[in-house]
Amino acid sequence: MRGAAVVMNPYADLPAERFWRKVVAGVPPFALAPGPSGAFSIAPGARVATAGSCFAQHVSRALTEAGFGRYLAEAAPEGLSAEDAEARQYGVYSARYGNVYTARQLLQLFDRAYGTYQPELVAWTRPDGRRVDPFRPAVEPAGYADDATLLAARAEHLAAVRRMFEELDVFVFTLGLTEGWEHRADGAVLPVAPGVIADGFDPARYAFVNARAGAVRDDMLAFLARLFAVNARARVILTVSPVPLIASYADRHVLVSNAYSKAALRVAAEEIVEAEPRAVYFPAYEIVTSTANAGRYYADDLRSVTPEGVAHVMRVFLAAFTDAPPLTRVPHPLGLEYARAATVVCDEEAIERSLV
């Protein structure tokens, strides 16, 4: 019609990163770089705290390898040998909370640290009579002699968690699972099922839960509101772990359960960063699981991420969030020292060990 405006193809002026052919199929797998645009910058010397599922440990180590110091709010006591410190999980994360697999577990960690939530569950008992902290069951290999010792250690730990939240500059959290277990009496979330590391499973006391995407979103947004209330300058980087479930309690094939879990976490992460501009999503999950890599970033167990996969993730991470010159970015592959230390501590792996 004469005089009508010409409508251009709405895709005509989009940048190359919006087209699969140009930036996925059209580049070598190692060059895949879907880092977030417009991300904030992590300054040298920034206090970068980490938490989450097992994959978060790779992020911590790779940051250290690249010359960015990790923030430790709970360091090993003086005189403790390096071997004992490692066994007791000092330095695995910024505080000694062990794996934090779910958003609700993270939210409750914050509330326990600030005294607004005190679970009824105090301790689990091992077959040898030693006591175990059910909220971080693997941090003391020898267990505790009694409840008083356990509670004193817990109070010291939660003080360090408060310090971490108040002093950190950047918080990197890896969402790992939707499946989990809770204490029926008050909904206290547990990192592993009772009976796997200590105590025994009683279905009258413990319930299996599998969070929906909306619940993950709401729990994470509630946590962020609490974090920013005590630390207004904090910035948050969210990731989704590419490590598959080691086991599923849901009544279906573990492959199907894993697909649901990762999809729900990814949807939740998207909605979280849309609602909270101080949080950014980083696509570690997409880099490792991309069809462009044809599974080559997984070890023979099809679950463990290889050092080469971690190196790729961290190259993209550092390019997105730091101004580090290229030579200080994580090489490909990671150095020999990292490869030697690339094992991670996963509470959930105790599931398989308990069946032997």
Image: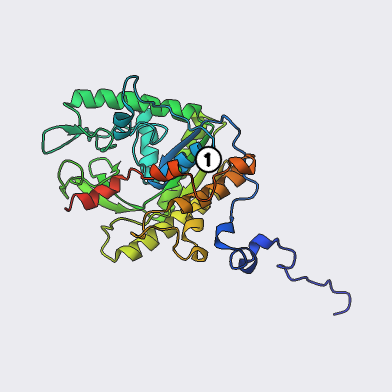
Q: Residues within 10 Å of mark 1 (few under 14, many from 20)?
A: many
Q: Quadrant of residue 78?
A: top left
Residue at x-position 42% and y-position 53%: 306
Indicate the position of residue 29 as horizontal and vertical percent values. Answer: 55, 62
Q: Quadrant of residue 278?
A: top right
Amino acid bearing label 1: Val
Q: Quadrant of residue 210?
A: bottom left
Task: Give the residue furthest to the top.
Answer: 78
Q: Nearer the viewer, residue 333 or 177?
A: 333
Colouring of the image: rainbow
In-image side of 268 versus 127 (left or right): right
Q: Nearer the viewer, residue 48 or 175?
A: 48
Q: Nearer the viewer, residue 346 or 338?
A: 338
Residue at x-position 30% and y-position 50%: 180
| Residue 271 can be seen in this image | no
Quadrant placement of the N terminus? bottom right
Q: Which residue is mark 1?
A: 236
In-image side of 354 versus 3 (left or right): left
| Up/down of 230 relative to 212, above or below | above
Indicate the position of residue 37 as horizontal and vertical percent values. Answer: 64, 50
In-image side of 195 versus 291 (left or right): left
| Up/down of 158 relative to 10, above or below | above
